[in-house]
Image (spheres, helix red, strand yellow):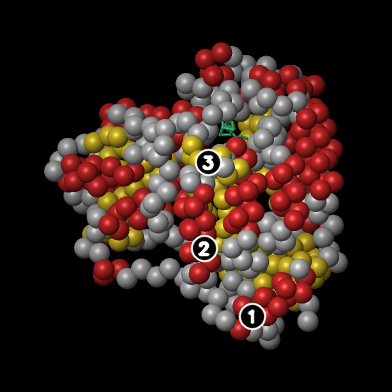
């Protein structure tokens, strides 16, 4: 395996490995501008929307002032996410005063949550479209061009957009996201996603494999399989473990990642498949939310503290070098100081490489909003969150410092943000690695073997091993 990989690596170094998507701006009579918020699913959906709009004669622009159609693909996960979108709309209000013909559309989870209310609350919005209704955009746009404000927020049980080939927006030409399922059936009590994204459904495996194969042929070297709960992927005979294996078999040079895993669903089968294939990245994002079993039960996460700790143990038994990150919520309804300390102690035991940390934000319509009182005072939530962040910062720092002296295979994604003389890419554990280009004939999409010399709490700094 090691020999084969080295041979393949040498071949890419000689070949043309980087083929970015280039759009001819004059090819389309009209222009659209799209901004995406929230999770990767939303960014991935925007690429489907771009594809639908191309068919309608709209080309993408990065300058909203010249757009005929401005779209915001929105997120509802926390109140702040919605506030950001409302603030952004005020910018477009000024533009609309200057150019009244510009159409403004709101897509995604906030569109789904607020439905027609959006048109009443935000007078400048012309089109409101939920995540399962993007195929109706051409009709909605044409109605809006005729002066009629329009809404389509129907959720679907089977829409996966499987036949629509996404237009890669803002792509580095190396890494791409591929949606493998939509919706979520889990009903975590704090979460708005089941209401904004509807029932879970898996996309057929053949169309996923065809998309990954096509990306590889166009020079991409990494695909991330996306879903709210990828481990419950199921289509015909194909489980998530099998899908992962089949994507990994496309080429040893195509890295495979996935997000997000639910602790209750990630199986040994998946872990063993990861261990078996060098090109399946050794990194798992495994949101824990809380380290206390009573709080987890109120959240309806359906696992206990012990179950989670066992999962982490199992991951490290099967893949000792696996990167691990998590999501944590502070101050969920009724959480006591002691229960909060359980979250801190779980973090000590797991030593995550990275975490996304939030204070609880009550969302209208969720089970928690209907059943429980949001009774942890805001200042307590914030203080607990700060304790969580402080602890995690220490763990991240330790994790990155621990890599000094180690050697990693890094997929080059771009120039480093600070200097054109450095490359930036990630190792299999998903850590960003920056290193000088030197005199090597390397390019984006190539793999480099890098030894780590220094680290911050979010970046490894190294040098190419000759
Ligand atoms: N499907 C993924 C997560 C989707 S949302 C999963 O189940 O893991 C991403 C993260 O946002 C969640 O993991 C959770 O930590 C956070 N989140 C969701 N709802 C929230 C809320 N009401 N308040 C604060 N954080 C929330
Ligand atoms: Fe939300 Fe839970 Fe589904 Fe994740 S698994 S999207 S947190 S309901
Ligand atoms: Fe936000 Fe919707 Fe994703 S609520 S996190 S954009 S699924």
How far separated are the C-alphas under marks 1 and 2?
Answer: 18 Å
Which SS class for mark 3? loop
Q: Is residue 275 above or below residue 301?
A: below
Q: Which residue is mark 3?
A: 236
Circle 3 or circle 2, nearest the eye: 3
Residue at (59% x, 26% y) in the render? 188
Residue at (63% x, 48% y) in the render? 242
* Viewer-nearest residue: 255 or 443: 255
Which SS class for mark 2? helix
Q: Which residue is mark 2?
A: 213
Which one is earlier in the sequence, the residue at label 3 or at label 1?
1
Q: Is residue 35 above or below residue 268?
A: below
Give the class, few, some or many, for how many residues have Cα within 10 Å of label 1's Cα (few <14, many ≥20): few
Specify whether 169 is left or right of 462: left
Q: Residue 165 appears at what percent x and percent y?
A: 40, 56
Q: Which residue is mark 1?
A: 11
Could you tell me if the residues under marks 3 and 1 are in contact, i.e. CB atoms within 8 Å?
no
Which one is earlier in the sequence, the residue at label 3 or at label 2?
2
Q: Residue 287 appears at what percent x and percent y?
A: 67, 37
Which SS class for mark 1? helix
Q: Residue 74 appears at what percent x and percent y?
A: 43, 41
């Amino acid at each position: 395996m090691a020999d084969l990989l080295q041979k393949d690596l040498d071949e890419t170094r000689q070949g043309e490995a980087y083929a970015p998507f280039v759009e001819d701006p004059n090819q389309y009579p009209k222009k659209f501008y799209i901004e995406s918020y929230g999770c990767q699913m939303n960014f991935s959906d925007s690429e489907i929307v771009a594809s639908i709009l191309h068919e309608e004669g709209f080309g993408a622009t990065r300058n909203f002032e010249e757009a005929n159609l401005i779209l915001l693909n929105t997120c509802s996960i926390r109140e702040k996410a919605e506030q950001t979108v409302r603030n952004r709309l005020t910018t477009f209000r000024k533009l609309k005063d200057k150019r009244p013909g510009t159409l403004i559309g709101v897509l995604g989870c906030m569109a789904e949550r607020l439905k027609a209310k959006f048109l009443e609350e935000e007078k400048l919005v012309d089109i409101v479209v939920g995540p399962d209704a993007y195929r109706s955009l051409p009709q909605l746009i044409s109605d809006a061009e005729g002066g009629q404000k329009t809404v389509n927020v129907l959720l679907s049980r089977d829409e996966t957009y499987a036949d629509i080939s996404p237009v890669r927006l803002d792509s580095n030409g190396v890494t791409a996201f591929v949606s493998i399922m939509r919706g979520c059936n889990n009903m975590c009590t704090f979460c708005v996603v089941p209401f904004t994204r509807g029932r879970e459904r898996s996309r057929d495996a053949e169309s996923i494999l065809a998309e990954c194969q096509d990306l590889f042929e166009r020079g991409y070297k990494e695909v991330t399989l996306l879903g709210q709960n990828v481990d419950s992927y199921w289509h015909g005979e194909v489980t998530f473990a099998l899908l992962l294996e089949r994507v990994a078999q496309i080429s040893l040079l195509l890295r495979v990642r996935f997000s997000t895993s639910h602790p209750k669903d990630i199986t040994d089968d998946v872990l063993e498949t990861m261990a078996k294939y060098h090109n399946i990245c050794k990194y798992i994002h495994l949101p824990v939310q809380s380290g206390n079993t009573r709080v987890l039960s109120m959240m309806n996460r359906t696992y206990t503290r012990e179950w989670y700790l066992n999962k982490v143990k199992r991951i490290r038994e099967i893949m000792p070098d696996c990167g691990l990150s998590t999501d944590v919520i502070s101050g969920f309804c009724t959480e006591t100081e002691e229960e909060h300390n359980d979250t801190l102690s779980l973090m000590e035991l797991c030593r995550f490489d990275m975490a996304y940390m939030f204070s609880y934000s009550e969302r209208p319509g969720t089970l928690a909003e209907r059943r429980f009182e949001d009774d942890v005072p805001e200042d307590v939530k914030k203080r607990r969150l700060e304790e969580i962040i402080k602890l995690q910062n220490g763990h991240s720092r330790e994790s990155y410092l621990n890599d000094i002296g180690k050697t990693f295979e890094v997929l080059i994604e771009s120039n480093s943000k600070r200097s054109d003389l450095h490359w930036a890419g990630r190792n299999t554990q998903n850590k960003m690695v920056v290193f000088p280009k030197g005199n090597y004939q390397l390019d984006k999409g190539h793999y480099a073997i890098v030894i780590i010399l220094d680290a911050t709490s979010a970046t490894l700094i190294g040098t190419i091993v000759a």
